[in-house]
Amino acid sequence: MKIFEEFTYERPDMQEEKNKFKELLEAFTSAKSQEEATEAVESINAFRQRLSTLFELVFIRASIDTNDEFYQNERDFTDEMEPEITAMDTAFYKELVKSPYRDQLEKQWGTQLFNIADFRIREFSPEVIGLLQKENRLMSEYSKLVASAEVEFEGKTYTLAQLEPFMQDTDRTRRKKAIEASTGFFEENAAKFDDIYDQLVKLRHKIATTLGYKNFVELGYIRMQRFDYNPNMVAVFRRQVRDIIVPIASKLYKKQEERIGLDALKFHDENFIFKSGNATPKGSSEWIIENGIKMYEELSEETNQFFHYMLNRNLMDLEAKKGKEAGGYCTYMEDYQSPFIFANFNGTSGDVDVLTHEAGHAFQDYSSSDIGVPEYLYPTHEAAEIHSMSMEFFTWPWMELFFKEDTDKYKYAHLAEGLQFIPYGVAVDEFQHLVYENPEWTPDERKEAWRKLEQTYLPHRDYDGNTYLESGAFWQRQGHIYEDPFYYIDYTLAQICAFQFWKRSRENQEDAWNDYVHLSKLGGSKSFLELVETANLRSPFEEGTVESVVGTIEAWLDSVDDKAL
């Protein structure tokens, strides 16, 4: 059994790889039977999975240590080569969809593979390889810039992740100063953040028009593989959020203001939930993992096997440290059938959220690792987030292990914050629609658009005179906007589904869990709405779903004496 540190990387010779791929593709196109075609596809898949594994190793190791010169150089290499890989994938997809054995192959692997192939073909042309390479370089430039933050606060130097506990401090003045210190980094680099995004927007618009689209919105939906919903359906969902959820979220912020004894809730108060302090884990990172072992052993046999698999292979890097990129993620190395969880533990309740959220992604990867079709290893993003957000709720019965006397605080905050997040999530989505519909906008016009969206979806928000944030620049810290365009509404759609699993798990844990495991095993073999139906959930786009789901959440929150927590 190999551990992560033993996973090997060697830079591939791309000319040799292209020659090898050409031979493999010729074997597929010249196949004389379905059996030969299947064998050829399996060889192509093995080839693609090997390259994918090498690229993921570079990504992980470069994000763990942005000061590692070798892996930073290799990341630059993979940024350049990724469009070349896309070109090979597209060539394969073009042959797959016109194969004389298509009908038999569809029966063997399902129609979703061919839907994916069709969308992949539509998002690429050799004409845009140079533009895609530049897009990759700009995205890496953004992530490296954020990771470079070394912020002075109270005589010490911190990363952005390490500053977060101070933003939840019981001392209001300290919270405000921590926010100002964090914001100060973005303000000092505002011109760089503006320039990177300005280049990305114009570049993506050029890629879209080169491929024959009006603007990047249409291409963005194709990249996200949104097979069964469109911008109009998303706009209707956003309207429901505005009309139904925003008033509830505003009420929750008002309750928070009263609960912590303020005349007016300011931005630096938003993450301070209880007057006596937020719920925090009652031990070290190692202690959290030890309790995580107990939690996943008891939750189910599936999670017991999964979590020990992760631990025994060192497939998690959880501590915040200098030189490490911000945020958290789960990715997958196909040749080793190994998920990997990346996080920045900092002593807040978010540490436990990572252990459940990213583990939800990893559990899905682990559960569908034998599915046999690389395209099916992951579902589309909004479906993938169902796994992560729902795992947060399935593990509720074990939260006392981590929070002890603060367990009720954690549960109340977790549910309230899940609801309050949705308006912000749809604001990020609408912002991106506006930006890519108006690629000629200046940085100031983008910030003005964001400020208007905040007034619509976050009407409670008061930046208390912080000129940088009041200028409409808050979105610059949201990495998805730079690195994964249109990847954000996904969290809100998934949250509506996860809330349903929360409700069902309280009514019948066994049935809800069985549906969740079944959903995880399906991976990406079906589209988003097909997966939702298979899991016995209601579509977030269905009339009445939003109102019924959040009504249940609101009723539970109202039943809690939050001032006593």
Image (cartoon, helix red, strand yellow):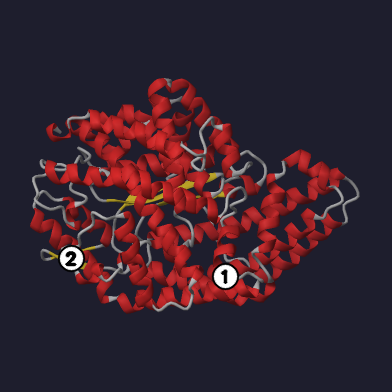
| Side of 515 where 27 appears, left or right | right
The image quadrant where one finds the C terminus is top left
Residue at x-position 64% and y-position 69%: 84
* Residue 81, image quadrant: bottom right
| Side of 422 where 17 appears, left or right | right
Judge whether 290 appears above or below 506 on screen. Answer: below
Q: Is residue 46 visible?
A: no
Judge whether 302 appears above or below 245 on screen. Answer: above
Which label was assigned to residue 141?
none
Percent of width and height locating residue 416: 28, 40
* Residue 93, image quadrant: bottom right
* Residue 407, image quadrant: top left
Q: Tell me how far mark 2 sits from mark 1, CA to CA.
A: 37 Å
Q: Are marks 2 and 1 in contact (CB under 8 Å)?
A: no
Q: Which residue is mark 2?
A: 180
Mark earlier in primary sequence (2, 1): 2
